[in-house]
Amino acid sequence: MVHKPSNKDKVYAKPLKEPEGFKFDAKVADVFENMITRSVPGYPLMLDLIGMLGEMYAIADTRCYDLGCSLGASTLKLRQHLPQSCHLIGIDSSSAMVERCRANVARDHSQASVEILEQKIQDTEFESASVVVINFTLQFIPDNERVAMLKKIADGMVTGGALILAEKIVFSDHEKQRFMTELHHEFKKYQGYSDLEIAQKRASLENVLIPNTEEEHIDRLKEAGFSSAQVYIRCLNFASILAIK
Ligand SMILES: C[S@@+](CC[C@H](N)C(=O)[O-])C[C@H]1O[C@@H](n2cnc3c(N)ncnc32)[C@H](O)[C@@H]1O
């Protein structure tokens, strides 16, 4: 099936009787590129840095992973910067995303081999990984499963390997949290979303996207077995973190 690559996101444009919990279904997959670009401030820069860091940390003859690969934006950025002998594995549990991701990957002719698997990250085995990307996906994993999942990833990585983690974050300082939430709301309005769209999407993500603070992320990464972890981009309430095994 051919999917139009970047339809405008109107998922929450009409009033809904009761906003359902957010799902990565076909309706979202059809507009996802537009949705994430207009919702995450700094997203294009974050993608560029995945390519740059991939080039710095990928080691020949190892594996690389993109966890929660969606339509393959982060997968392809990474693939385009990998040595030919790396094998890249994209993982996503949404069949709508995987179908579209495979079609996008088929149009890319970078040299490193790639496969896109429809499965849960929790069911994935990691082996000799030099680069692992988890871009805006950990926040959808139940909070009490996150340490175990990161431990499993760290155990499957080579020493010196890089985990690139991006997340929506929260702030323990109440005033800072209020201000960043307001600024993010303004950013979405600037991107053309109405107040109704913003409110309905926020309600549907409630209890589905569970954000942590930067400090919680850093502490948890160290607990999981990474020797260092630091924030290298923050744009409003969205951050990218580099952790080294
Ligand atoms: C916000 S999107 C990721 C965006 C993508 N990494 C990018 O940079 O364009 C989150 C993705 O994670 C997937 N996902 C959520 N929970 C998952 C799980 N437990 N295992 C695998 N994929 C999961 C969703 O289906 C969705 O496609």
Image (tube, rainbow, N blue to C red):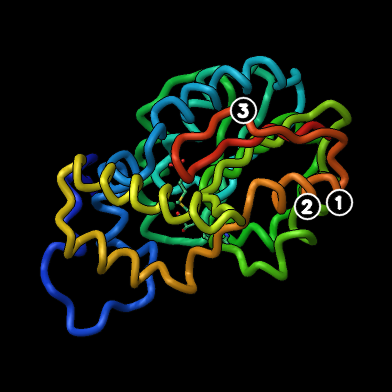
Q: Which residue is mark 2?
A: 220
Q: In the current view of this chain or complex, which residue is farthest to the left?
A: 14
x 59%, y 47%: residue: 67
Under 8 Å from ligand 1: the CB of mark 2?
Answer: no
Q: Name the residue beneath numbered marker 1.
A: 223
In the figure, is residue 133 to the left or right of 73?
A: right
Give the secondary structure at mark 3: strand
Q: Contact, CB < 8 Å: mark 3 with mark 2? A: no
Rendering coords of residue 159 (x, y %): 88, 30
How much space separates mark 3 and mark 2, taking CA atoms? 17 Å
Tell me: 140 left or right of 106.
right
Q: Is residue 13 above or below residue 98?
A: below
Q: Which mark is residue 232?
A: 3
In three-dimensional space, the C-alpha distance between marks 1 and 2, rounded to whole angstroms, equals: 5 Å
Secondary structure of the residue carrying tag 1 is helix
x then y, percent, for residue 121: 64, 57
Tag 1 and tag 3, C-beta contact below 8 Å: no
For label 1, count other residues whose C-alpha is less than 10 Å away and answer few (under 14), some (14-19) or many (20+).
some
**Front-lying residue, 100 or 186:** 186
